[in-house]
Image (tube, rainbow, N blue to C red):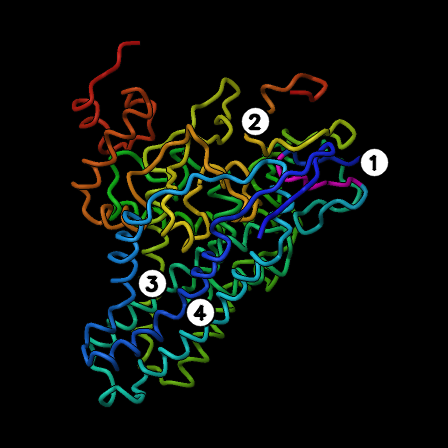
Amino acid sequence: MTVEATVDGQLVQWRDSKRYLWIMGALIPLIPLSTWGLHALTGSSLAWWFGPFFLFVVVPLADMAAGLDRNNPPDELIEALEQDTYYRWITYLFIPLQIAGLIWAAYLLGGGSLPGIDGALSVVDKIGLATSVGIVAGIGINTAHELGHKKAEYERWFARAALAQTFYGHFYIEHNRGHHVRVATPIDPASSRLGETLWGFLPRTVWGSLTSAWGLEKKRFERQKKTHWTPKNDLLNAWAFSVVLWGGLMIAFGWQIFPYMVLQAAVGIWLLEAVNYLEHYGMKRQVLESGRPERVNPSHSWNSNNIGTNVLLYHLQRHSDHHANPTRRYQALRDFKDAPVLPTGYAGMIVLATFPPIWRKVMDPRVLSHYDGDVERANLQPRAAEKYRRRYGQVAA
Amino acid sequence: MSVFICPNCEYTYDEAAGHPREGWVGGTAFADIDPDWTCPDCGVREQVDFVPVEQFERNDQDGNIISAESRDKEGRP
């Protein structure tokens, strides 16, 4: 199907080669259900671990095999493409499937059984299933991310629903009003620094984002001269979704599922923050004479055109355009030719980030070359700064 | 009472209506809003970046990043 528009009497047409592939994103929430099918077919306990296997083995291999898609919609058609509601329905569909998958998994985690399963799951099987559910939870944060950026109020409520599973309702406040404002500056908790490991970044971003989100809402209510202890506080009403969802599941399937709920949320949060880690690693906006940081531009984000991860994450990897135009819908995001590019898709890069020495070997030279060898222009982790200056040297002014 | 527009996402601030959710009651002059107040929709433009709606021609979403510092006094890039 082609999108078309008439500009100055000229008909412009464009065919979205990924149009039907985008449905893949909405199939992610079926991962928990598929573990059951795999287990029934193979009888293997490994089936419960299908979620991480899919994301960290299947998707990176698919990225390598399927290659890149640099195709951009023409500027004249961006608006028409954004108005095609087909695309947004795919993101809406994700959420009921996500919640259904969680309920279904909670039944098994609470000791339930199904045809093809020999009695209740063992503790190890349950940990595997909860990890698989957590992969969906993390990708659910990405769906919430797409929806939370939109102007329609109901889409922002959908975002809260998608965040309920991970208890990460504050994300869409902090991300839109905190991270996007301060991205690629040393004060942004969600922008990783050169020399910072994923594991060191995790506590800084999780805690920093929470406190920042709370501060942003508090400030908003201070301007209204009202207390921020109200259901109108977007953090409190977003967390209320989690209280209802988690509470409901524990009433239905027993409090014993609680540790597994925590585990799946932790996996989801870890996944989201690992993506945060690689999106802006080492990037720094220079400070202007006025004291403000320069405007976010395409040079401040890491991108990838790998098809596999892109269709699963709604073009999140076209990250430079996303930061330039945060309200733009995923199908209309473009690849910027001069923007920094990762060696492979986000899924494969997460695997690398898990092993800091390998990550540094792959990424540090790329950050340095992005800044013409000048380590001082990068967002440098203070604790690692001396080591980096020794290793990469001072550049003559 | 005039209307100001975010040059990125085209959110408009109408002084007459204000934006009570953000803490700006109806009648709050745009000049009285904090300079570092960010656009409630896109978050990537601040009060100082907004332009009067009459001066607005098109958004800067084509990647031409227009910052307050690089605009002249008439608000043109």
- Of all chains, the one bearing label 3 is A
The residue that label 1 is drawn on is: B1
Tell me if label 4 and label 2 are in contact, CB under 8 Å: no
- Of all chains, the one bearing label 2 is B
Circle 3: residue type: Ile
Q: Are marks 4 and 2 on the same chain?
A: no
Q: Are marks 1 and 2 on the same chain?
A: yes
Distance Cα–Cα, label 4 vs label 2: 38 Å
Circle 1: residue type: Met
Density class for disc 2 (Cα within 10 Å; few <14, some 14-19, many ≥20) is few
Distance Cα–Cα, label 4 vs label 3: 11 Å
Circle 4: residue type: Gln
The residue that label 2 is drawn on is: B64
Task: Please tell me whether mark 4 sits on a helix, a strand or a loop.
Answer: helix
Is residue A36 left or right of A356 when viewed as pictured?
right
The residue that label 3 is drawn on is: A135
The image position of residue A174, as x and y in percent, is: 48, 49
The residue that label 4 is drawn on is: A98
Density class for disc 3 (Cα within 10 Å; few <14, some 14-19, many ≥20) is many
User: What residue appears at the point 35 percent right and 35 percent down from the top-left corner?
Assistant: A341
Can residue A236 be seen by looking at this rendering? Answer: no
Name the N-terminal-most of marks 1 and 2.
1
Q: On screen, A351 above or below A264? A: above
